[in-house]
Image (spheres, rainbow, N blue to C red):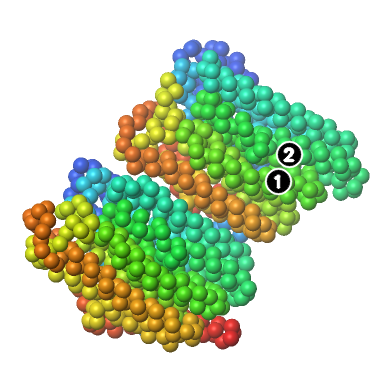
Amino acid sequence: MDLLFATLNLVTFFPLVGVLVILLIPRGAKNALRWTALLASLATFGFSLAMLGQFEASNPALQLVVRAPWIRLAGWTIEYHLGVDGLSILLVLLTTLLMPIGILSTWSAVEERVKEFMVFFLLLEVGMVGVFLALDLFLFYIFWEFTLVPMYFLIGIWGGTRRMYAAVKFFLYTMAGSILMLLAIVWLGLDQGTFSVPALLQGSIPAGTQIWLFLAFAAAFAIKVPMWPLHSWLPDAHVEAPTAGSVILAGVLLKMGTYGFLRFNLPLFPVAAVKLAPWMALLAVIGILYGAAVSYAQRDVKKLVAYSSVSHLGFVMLGLFALNPLGIQGGILQMVNHGLSTGALFLIVGMIYERRHTRDVDAFGGLWKVMPVYAALTLIVTLSSMGLPGLNGFVGEFTILLGAFGSKAIGSPWFAGLSALGVILAAIYMLYMFQKMFLGPLDKDENQKLKDLNAREIVTLVPLLVFIFWIGVYPKPFFDLMTPAVEHLVTALQTAALAVH
Amino acid sequence: MGGDFLAILPLIVVAGWASLLLLADLFVPVGRKGITGLLASLGLLAALGLTIAQFGAQRQAFGGMLLVDGYAAFLDVLFLFAGLFAITLAHDYLRRMGLERGEYYALLLFVISGMMMMAHAGDLIMLFIGLETLSIPLYVMAGLARPKPESEESALKYFLLGAFASSFEVYGIALVFGATSTTRLAGIVAAAQASSADSLLLVLGAVLILVSLSFKVAVVPFHMWTPDVYQGAPTPVTAFMSVGAKAGGFAGLLRVFLLAFPVLAASWAPAVLWVAVLTMVWGNVAAIVQSNIKRLLAYSSIAHAGYILMALPAAADPRVSPMAVSAALFYLFAYAITNLGAWGVVVALESADGKGLQVDDYAGLGTRHPWLAAAMALFMLSLTGVPPSVGFVAKFYLFSTVLDSGLIGLALVGVLTSLISAAFYLRVVVVMYMRTGEPQVRREGWLHATVGLMAAATLALGLLPTPLYELAARAGLLTLTR
């Protein structure tokens, strides 16, 4: 029984309880369905807080481990193996936080097939949390692929006009990467005789094969992040997805890619990571600048936010492949920051879309006069996204840049120098968007009668804003959670770096 | 001698019961042919019970004509299982389509007895008898919907190409006999190892047998008949063909090539490898453009034959051989479960005038019949190989044996073609959930129970595959090697 009700099991699988209840509720009772989903996701958030309470920040090891033999297949014992450490805990918390917010945002936006929506949404949470907690490669792959299915339905059923195209593109693109990873996982299992991540860390993988395995894993993760030039599924998926889908897609699903690099590529293939770090950094910097430049050119606000993700996740990748404590810590924090700010931005775009059914920046102008609360909240989120000191984005980006400047693995300060340009570009395109939408004369008739945010909408944004300020002003508790695990990881990477040079 | 009869009792029960059923059916009044179906299932259940009771036996019967081992027992279970569900799928369908004839059930049992003979074959002659016992009743079943032209075309095509394939087999057997002066599988091995055999004749014979069985399992380039036959045959027959007849063909293929021709592995393994590659690529690519669900599933079944065929070159490596055999067995079972369910959904949507067979006819199924649509979506994902489904586990197991034997390129083709397959399996899901429509669904108890059971099995074995794996692994290890 202890095994069954272990904290991590509850965090991962409690949404299934919500799914079961929802299946019993008639489809007409829309509010009952929404409340059930909301309560299930809030309870899951509660369990994740309990996890935080039991977590010892000073311990770099995997904690709250749940471990049981699960499948015997082809001579392997595949384990059901969950655990949390400083690398994953913030991402689990981010996921469980964004879920109830996402559900709240659908209250009036999703009117059709509410039952199925909530089922898929909660199933998605199971997959995402599972990805962050799984410590067996087979189990990880199952969660990883499983997240595709509900997201595919969320985009395909409740999305915009080109939803089917976007859904299929999302599925195929992501699957293309993951099947290469699957082969690498099988190969690793055959070579090392186990899928258990801690056991694989004990073993040693020859440097020659590390490169290939690294690339196969990277194929899956780089598409998910997405890294330039594998990003082209992202704008379609984001633009067509319903608001709550975009929030989760940007907030959590993309982090699965960066988390994959952090959890698997760096510790399992350290030699390859050290060797390839400059190349990964190069791609990251291209992504930062490219994403920013393309964002500037967008008329569709949602597309703008989507491309800004390419840019922001470039920073995360740059930080991770700095391969030093500052860079990795900044990278992890920036994953959380991006989840908060971009999640909030997609919520904001969704709110105006619900009112006006357009997202074209030219359709707006002077909104501050009719929607002051909305404008003020948007301004804060915009500033956070572009990295204004005092808000969360600054802390993350600054730490990443510090790490990248001093990184021996990347080997040149130029990468960091160029990516600093990305911060400036972000300011340009974000402020440009803000100016076009909120400032200037209120010259469009359709905008005259727009209602400001209602209480529910404010409630969806406030938790995100709290964290935006909190991380901006006092990030120490967040860094404290990850520091021991990151230092542990960096030690292993430095050993590999010595071996390479 | 008595022991021999006892050892192959399940086979005797099925064949004998089929003969009795032909007689018994005369006394079953028209319009109540469900009784024949019930009797047939009782026979299959009895045989299933006997097979399970005998699982683990390892012996030869009738002087090596028939082999009784874990491999055959596993496949027997699969055949009987597929037969049972071919009955539940057909029960209401035949009545609805005005095809209610008792022959369906008797013929089905004859086909199953033929498949069992192939799995048990210890002699090329037995293999041939099994193949014919499998094929001839199946030609009749494909034409059951006469005088519908599609059904007649299907039966004729299947018959002509099947006869063609059989003649290849006979000729191949003759050449092998010429080379080794025996048709006993064990004798062929001995002759080949003692290099007393004429190797050119032996290789030629082996190639001809490979060609003939390739027709049966429908791999490229011997697949041309499949889409037309699958489309024209009554749907439950198609379902059974795609699952049972294919498994029967593989039963013979694996048995002969791993038992009789391992010494020739260097000659046939590369050829089989390329056939597998071609099959996976062409089956999946051609499926993309299909708009008829029966043709789509036909190409899908071609593609899956390609996946299963990957086990053969992998098994040429003696170290991996038992594992490759059990991976193929596991895959066959996983494919059977998933595919029977998918065909069940096809049966549910097909109407008497032949409508409801286009992929577009599935529009709106997601809202109108959410459970049926969810089951179909699950089957499609399982056929693609997305976790958590039994299809994923099967592919995982198969790919791992292929990698283990060092065929990295083959495994790569396998995963990349799986990606292609996602495109057309997803299209079914897209149409079901993302388009609106008014699909007509038959509410028939047996049919929905079958679909539900298969969906539950697809999911349950996807999450907990260990029992099936252990059976397949035992079967792989218990394969008689001489």
Quarter of the image with the N terminus of chain A is: bottom left
Give the label on residue B210, or none.
2
Give residue A89's position: percent from left, percent from top.
Answer: 35, 73
Quarter of the image with the C terminus of chain A is: bottom right
Subunit under mark 1: B
User: Does label 1 or label 2 sit earlier along the sequence?
Assistant: 2
Asked if A471 appears above or below A178 in the picture, the reply is below
Give the label on residue A247, or none.
none
- Three-letter code for the amino acid on which mark 2 is drawn: Leu
- Give the structural element (helix, strand or loop) at label 1: helix
**Which residue is depicted at the point 87% across and 44% down?**
B199
Give residue B315's position: percent from left, percent from top.
Answer: 70, 51
| Along the viewing direction, whichever of B394 and A178 lies nearer the viewer | A178
Asked if B361 appears above or below A296 in the picture, the reply is above
**Which residue is depicted at the point 34% across and 75% down?**
A422
Q: Are marks 1 and 2 in contact (CB under 8 Å)?
A: yes
| Callouts 1 and 2 on one subunit | yes
- Three-letter code for the amino acid on which mark 1 is drawn: Val
Subunit under mark 2: B
Q: Is residue B179 visible?
A: yes
Q: Is residue A83 visible?
A: no
Q: In the drawing, does residue B401 fall left or right of residue B185?
A: left
Residue holding disc 1: B272
Work out how far the residue at label 1 is from the one at label 2, CA to CA, in angstroms: 9 Å
Determine crowd level at label 1: few under 14, some 14-19, many 20+ residues with C-alpha closer than 10 A.
Answer: many
Give residue A290's position: percent from left, percent from top.
Answer: 39, 68
Q: In the drawing, does residue A459 fall left or right of residue B78?
A: left
Give residue A293's position: percent from left, percent from top.
Answer: 34, 68
- Give the structural element (helix, strand or loop) at label 2: helix
Asked if A5 appears above or below B348 in the picture, the reply is below
